[in-house]
Image (cartoon, grey):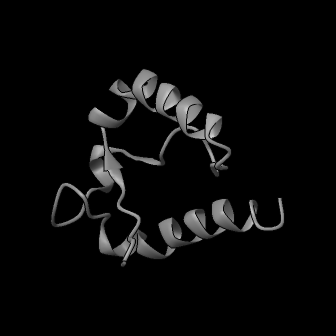
């Protein structure tokens, strides 16, 4: 299975905050851990060539954000 993190864009991302928090509670109730309850949301001006792509000049920045988020959960 290949899993890939996809960024979520505004305004859909922040408008779904309640959904993400409820989903996180359900997931945690199974014993699984989450790095955070809500996804990293991309502002409209940081969207690249598709609704689920960050601008090319920001890819390193978003990769760093995801890395720091995931690295912070290792060993917990």
Residue 54, placed above or below residue 24: below
Q: Nearer the viewer, residue 29 or 40?
A: 29
Left or right side of 48 for 75 = right
Q: Is residue 50 left or right of residue 74?
A: left
List x then y, in percent, for residue 67. 62, 70
Q: Where residue 39 sits in the image (x, y, percent)?
A: 48, 45
In the image, residue 69 sits, relative to residue 38, either above or below, namely below
- Nearer to us in this view, 35 or 53: 35
Image location (x, y in percent) of residue 26 = 54, 31
Q: Given the current orientation, which residue lies at the most extreme front position? A: 30
| 73 left or right of 6 in image | right
Between 32 and 54, the one lying in front of the other is 32
How many numbered discs sit on the rendered protein? 0
Dividing the picture into quadrants, the one containing residue 29 is top right
Q: From the viewer's perspective, is residue 13 above or below residue 54?
A: above
**Residue at horizontal 52 percent and vertical 28 percent from the top:** 21
């Amino acid at each position: 299975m290949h899993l890939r993190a996809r960024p979520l864009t505004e305004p859909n991302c922040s408008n779904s905050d309640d959904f993400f928090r409820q989903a996180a509670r359900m997931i945690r109730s199974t014993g699984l851990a989450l790095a955070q309850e809500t996804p990293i949301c991309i502002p409209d001006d940081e969207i690249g060539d598709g609704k689920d792509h960050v601008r090319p000049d920001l890819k390193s920045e978003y990769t760093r954000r995801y890395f720091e988020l995931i690295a912070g959960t290792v060993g917990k």
